[in-house]
Amino acid sequence: MNTTPLITIAVVDDHKYVREEISNMLLFMGFHVTIKAANGKDFLEQLAIAESLPDLCLLDLNMPVMDGIETAKAVKLQWPGMKILGYTFNSQEMTKMIESGADACILKCGDAMELKRTLLELYKSSSIQNS
């Protein structure tokens, strides 16, 4: 019997192929992707009507319409308990994501196991806070 909790994730990335491939990889890792959004505005609209909020959000930094920095700020204002993992190709922008409200930030070109490990750490930290 599997006692691992079902961890739900939103994937926000403007590149459809990247969004789909990351979603598939997360599914393979045992996560459940409940929201896929093309930009921050799309994500906020989906959150507003969602039956339940995802536990975590994987948020791209550079997107049209509403970027990751604006999105992280908006999410933390409205849903402060949601954990956000920012991700970008530019290591110099990682600090901006943290300052905007992301709970952690990793590089897109990083290892898949780093992604999984970081998501699990964020989930555990949110579970501890909600206990």
Image (cartoon, helix red, strand yellow):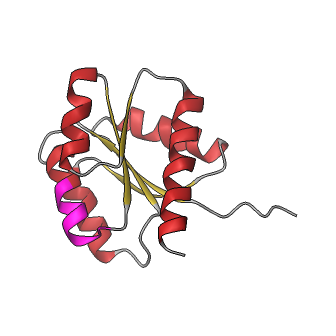
Q: Quadrant of the N terminus?
A: bottom right
Instruction: Give the residue displayed 57% in from the left and 43% down from the top.
Output: 26
Quadrant of the snapshot with the C terminus = bottom right
The answer to whether residue 28 is above or below residue 57 is above
Above or below: residue 56 compared with residue 128: above
- Most extreme residue toward the right is 1
Residue 27 in view (yes/no): yes
Highlighted magenta segment, given as a residue range: 73-80
Q: In the rendered image of this protein, does residue 31 appear above or below residue 114?
A: below
Looking at the image, residue 6 sits to the left or right of residue 50; the answer is: right
Q: Quadrant of residue 78?
A: bottom left
Q: What kind of secondary structure does the magenta stretch mostly adopt? A: helix
Looking at this view, is 49 or 69 the one in front? 69
Kindly indicate the quadrant of the structure image that contains residue 128.
bottom right
Query: Is residue 11 covered in magenta?
Result: no
* Image coordinates for residue 95, horizontal then vertical, percent: 23, 34
Q: Quadrant of residue 109?
A: top left
Q: Which x, y percent locates residue 92? A: 22, 22
Residue 81 lies, with reference to residue 59, above or below; the image says below
Residue 77 rendering spot, x and y as whole percentages: 19, 67
Q: Residue at x 29, y 67 (%)?
A: 80
Side of 66 relative to 117 (left or right)? left
Q: Residue at x 54, y 66 (%)?
A: 127
Q: Position of residue 62 (x, y in %)?
A: 20, 34
